[in-house]
Amino acid sequence: MSQKLHGLMAEFEDHAQVVEAARRAHETGYRCMDAYTPFPVEGLPEALGSRRTAVPRIVLTGGIIGAVGGYFMEWYSMAVDYPINIGGRPFNSWPAYIPITFELTVLCAAISAIVGMLALNCLPQPHHPVFNVPGFERASTDRFFLCIEASDPKFEPSVTRQFLESLQPNSVKEVEE
């Protein structure tokens, strides 16, 4: 039984090599690719052509929902549901609502950040096809990998393999799903 091809993966020894390989692959027209490194590499996201993330907008939305929800919760309970006139203060005494409003803003923004980051990164993901590549476990210690996925419109197995081999990697391996 033949497995479906996920892509081709090149293995490099140096972080500068993988950045240059990603830059050249992006210049060549490949867009569906990812790099795997043992530590953050400066310039790699730009070389891969990464775009801005939606996490800041998700966090802002969560914070606004938290602020409005916190203020509404206090206003409703103090002014509508159970109004008690203590010391002649108005029912809608907004300065008393500031601490809870602030705390719910921060809480909802933080929860939105965590959930948004996990969702946008497709996590948790206990298995990924690149885990099947022999030697890929070295991506967490001392090797750098660039994987061009078969879903890329420009992907042609023989042409892409030739391109990756022209980058002078240690090896080029098939990634099967």
Image (cartoon, grey):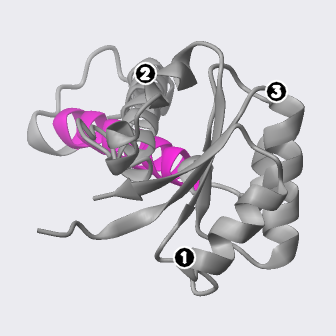
Q: Position of residue 109 (x, y in %)?
A: 46, 36
**Which numbered dot is residue 6?**
none
Q: Is residue 137 left or right of residue 43?
A: left
Q: Is residue 31 left or right of residue 5?
A: right
**Residue 62 falls inside the magenta stretch:** yes
Q: For this rendering, which residue is in front, 50 or 148?
A: 148
Q: Earlier in the sequence, mark 1 or mark 2?
A: 2
Q: Which residue is mark 3?
A: 14
**Disc 2 marks which amino acid?**
Glu
Region of the chain picked out in magenta, as a range: 57-79
Report the mark closest to the observer, 1 or 2: 1
Residue depicted at 60% across the width and 77% down the height: 158
Classify 10 Å Cα crowding around label 2: few (below 14), some (14-19), many (20 and above): some
**Residue 102 falls inside the magenta stretch:** no
Residue depicted at 83% across the width and 76% down the height: 28
- Which quadrant of the structure image shows residue 123? top left
Report the mark closest to the observer, 2 or 3: 3
Q: Which residue is mark 2?
A: 103
Residue depicted at 72% across the width and 69% down the height: 162
Q: Position of residue 85 (x, y in %)?
A: 24, 25
